[in-house]
Image (tube, grey):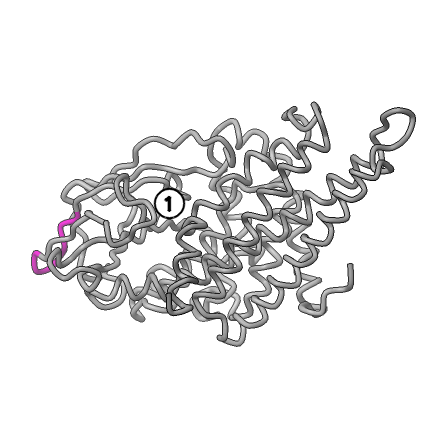
Amino acid sequence: MNTRELFDGEHESFRRTVRAFLDKEVIPYHEQWEKDGVVSREVWLAAGRQGLLGFDVAEEYGGGGSVDFRYNMVLAEEMTHTGVHGPGFPVHNDIIVPYITSLGTEEQKRRWLPGCCNGDLITAIAMTEPGAGSDLQGIRTTAVDKGEHYVLNGSKTFISNGILSDLVIVVARTDPDAGVKGMSLLVVERGMEGFERGRNLEKIGQHAQDTAELFFDNVEVPKENLLGEEGSGFISLMVNLPQERLSIAMMAAAACEAVLKMSLDYAKQREAFGRPIGSFQHNRFLLAEMATESHIARVFIDDCVRRHNKGELDASAASMAKWWTTELQKKLVDQSVQLHGGYGYMMEYPVAKAYLNSRIQTIYGGTTEIQKEIIGRSLGL
């Protein structure tokens, strides 16, 4: 594969920093975190000290002061290549903190961003509800204006960082009769009365990533915790969702590369009928296809990140990136399991974990079907 022109020396230096951090602070503990269903808070503090949180946050609030999404990409790639999914850094950096930086008042930024950057404050966003799924217009959680505060009632599910989170951006209806114009974003803080966490949900993969149910029972949320204008929540989500989808696509492209490497290593080492299985034409052709498709994904996503940095990546292109790379990831990892034979079904082999961990990719951030619907509408259909 050709050298990637997307990165310069600073990005590659940062990559070495990230890899050293993962080798020291994450990989030795990840197996235990998978058993626990959650990572330690200490790894978040360590990430903050290493400068791995809040890349795009201004330095005056404790961040890296860079709006270059390539740094986010490096972190996502290294986490994917090393098979560590537990620390929800990409969710925090790529999806949630940008809501605060783009919508927050000066007071809100000074109150929350330093903690988001040093690891003291772990964030989550609560969109999905038990009865709504990808249909944001079906949200039923309500926030009633009581003058100095809102009274929040409802429930959310499948919330990444849900157990550890200290700040949760909750999508709620402040005007139930205004349709999408009646949605607002409220920041609920750990310890608010009536805010409860349900189960740490048991998933088929990504076991170290805490994913929770959240419940809001007459939670009094101060007006100072309204993020953006009242009624502008749906528009804010539409503006920020493309970056979330690009973030998932970045991980998918990196996962395709990781699966290809696993497959090549196995095909060269494993022998059958007296020769390496990679020497059989069927397997050689399969690996040739995997290498080609993985390379296409890499070129595609690198271009998307380049365009995103210029402010030129629209919602349709982000949806194309999200659905295509995640479906490819799902396909390649399935092919790799088949190539590994019985060993591919054994959890001691990385490909088995990759198989389980990859399945969510075509679902969260908006399902493949939702992405195609967005693209179809952009075509005037």
337 or 85: nearer the eye? 337
Q: Residue at x 55, y 66 (%)?
A: 69
Q: Residue furthest front?
A: 381
Under mark 1, the amino acid is Ser
Q: Is residue 117 visible?
A: no
Region of the chain picked out in magenta, as a range: 146-152
Left or right: where does residue 88 sit relative to residue 278?
A: left
Name the quadrant containing residue 174. bottom left
In the rendered image, the quadrant that contains the N terminus is bottom right
- Counting from the top left corner in percent of width and height, residue 54 is at 48, 61
Q: Residue at x 68, y 28 (%)?
A: 344
7 or 379: nearer the eye? 379
Residue designated by label 1: 165
Disc 1 secondary structure class: loop
Q: Residue furthest right?
A: 274
Q: Residue at x 57, y 42 (%)?
A: 330
